[in-house]
Amino acid sequence: MTIDARLAELGIALPEAAAPAANYVPFVEAVGLLHISGQIPFDAGGQLIRGRLGEDMGVAEGQEAARRCAIGLLAQMKAALGSLDRVAQIVKLSVFVNSAPGFTDQPEVANGASDLMVAVFGERGRHARSAVGVAVLPRGVAVEIDAVVAVS
Amino acid sequence: MTIDARLAELGIALPEAAAPAANYVPFVEAVGLLHISGQIPFDAGGQLIRGRLGEDMGVAEGQEAARRCAIGLLAQMKAALGSLDRVAQIVKLSVFVNSAPGFTDQPEVANGASDLMVAVFGERGRHARSAVGVAVLPRGVAVEIDAVVAVS
Amino acid sequence: MTIDARLAELGIALPEAAAPAANYVPFVEAVGLLHISGQIPFDAGGQLIRGRLGEDMGVAEGQEAARRCAIGLLAQMKAALGSLDRVAQIVKLSVFVNSAPGFTDQPEVANGASDLMVAVFGERGRHARSAVGVAVLPRGVAVEIDAVVAVS
């Protein structure tokens, strides 16, 4: 099954890959690795998902924000590679969670992205990961995730 | 001298490599680079080392937490590669220190990990590094460190 | 035009590459990628640029701090490669901005570094990027940036 067919089966429609607003690019491929810029979460209507975990947002909402970041990463992979079938392995996700000082469930939030990668790519979706809580993110979004992907 | 012999000389016993609690994996190897997931610190008794630098933890305790993260990284390298002698070079450590806003000695804390890598691997242990202070870490731990390692 | 000539045209004098103060190194090259340690900003007089965005520092000052971090990265590339003409592509910048909880313009701050890379390297300077707001940085500096660079 192609990854596009798998996405359809999961009911996931990829948005347009977000264009950077400045002098950087959404992805760079070098030596077989695709580095993807940090993606922030847009809901299905194209609105930013803002909030701080442990303050005005719960874990389930945070997971959905992480999932939407992962969908943004998929959109960038497709824009970079033409076809998602060229993804050999998701190598690394770096997950930054907008967190109040008492919130320590960053791994649960990050699972929103990790679970999606495995649902879409199977074994090729299993990645190394870091998840940390940061003071604040661009535009006040809840989660930002960047990625390293091995391509074939 | 093998790295295992060097570890014995240093009196370092590697713990079982920690298993991720979710849909990610502790390491991914691609194009000769091993990306290792963020490791959090467990003491010799297997308990998490929790605390925030500049609040309820001093630099020496933070260094020990960083050292324990580095031991977790070694355990993952061994699980990934079979033998630590296959480590060609520690390429990069990203060190996240749970920090109160007034604490600015992240480099000193990170040295707990850097010194261990050089003690174990010698020149092959000298790495690029970043060290930043974050608002909060998973489970309230003091330090989280991920790594990129070149393998032979 | 060589990159050194371009730097002269831009009026940029590279400082001495900063030496790490501990058991790590400013850069490691492996499999065609140069990983550069997190650089903190020094002004033209060699003084650290300290401050927290949204608290005691504005966006324009933050951009200048990011630009100075980027100049530090250039100095490390030159030290690593001998000549900046060996830079094939700036692959990734990870930008950590010392931010008060209400400050959400990390991308604007990071542009201080991104714009410089494109001014110096042109298309080869266009990179993937993440920008996040952290609670505190080493020595109280305003910005820290690390980099991955493809070399030829």
Image (spheres, coloured by chain):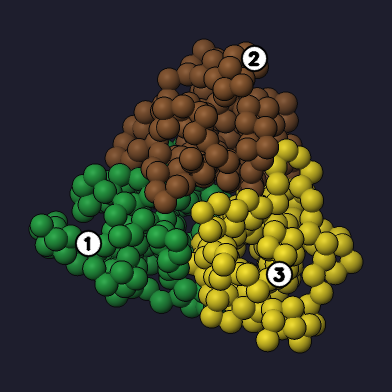
Chain colours: A green, B brown, C yellow
The foreground one among A110 and A45 is A110
**Left or right of A105 in this view: C15:** right
Q: Are marks 1 and 2 on the same chain?
A: no
Three-letter residue code for mark 1: Asp
Dividing the picture into quarters, in which one does residue C16 lie? Answer: bottom right
In this rendering, the answer to whether C55 lies above or below B4 is below
Residue type indicated by callout 2: Glu
Q: Nearer the viewer, residue A20 or A97?
A: A20
Residues at marks 1 and 3, CA–CA distance in whole angstroms: 38 Å
Which of these two is toward me, B70 or A139? B70
Q: Mark 1 highlights which residue?
A: A85
Residue at 58 percent across and 82 percent down: it is C122
Given contact means CB atoms under 8 Å apart, are the residues at marks 3 and 2 in contact?
no
Label tally: 3
Q: What residue sits 70% from the left and 42% below the top? A: C24
A60 to B81, vertically: above or below: below
> Measuring 73% from the left and 57% from the top, which residue is drawn there?
C40
On the question of residue B95 being in view, the answer is yes
